[in-house]
Image (spheres, helix red, strand yellow):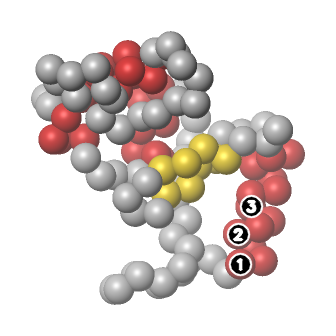
Amino acid sequence: MPGTDTLAFARSMEEGEFWMFILEERWSKLHGSYSMVVGGTPNQVFPMFLPSATEYIAHGIKEGMQSSVDAHSLWYKIKRVAHFDCIATASSGTHSYALLDG
């Protein structure tokens, strides 16, 4: 956050790792402030950094929103992402996560 030594959004398990801070800072500057980048989904960010297409899949049911895919189809899509070495993310609405094949 501005005026502090902590990141507003990104976190790392590696002490001293700062590349996320640089991306976070640049992203907020691009959009005017940190308050302008609160919320959103990873598929809105990736096209700015990577020359790739994105797909948004709503899974689970929230108020006023229905799932766009059943559990079997979702698992199939996740396996395809891993097979083709693509980047996949998941979002709970308040947090975003990268799905990495280890």
Q: Are marks 2 and 1 in contact (CB under 8 Å)?
A: yes
Tell me what residue is drawn at x 66 percent, y 40 percent. Answer: 87
Residue, disc 1 = 71
Q: Are marks 3 and 2 in contact (CB under 8 Å)?
A: yes
The kind of residue on which mark 3 rests is Lys
Residue, disc 3 = 77
Quadrant of the frame with the C terminus: top right
Dot 2 lies on which element?
helix
The kind of residue on which mark 2 rests is Leu
Residue, disc 2 = 74
Dot 3 lies on which element?
helix
Tell me what residue is drawn at x 46 percent, y 34 percent. Answer: 11
**5 and 20: which is toward the camera:** 5
- Percent from the top left, x then y, of residue 23? 39, 22
Q: Is residue 90 left or right of residue 20?
A: right
Say whether disc 1 or disc 3 marks the residue closer to the N-terminus.
1
Q: Residue 37 appears in which quarter of the rendering?
A: top left
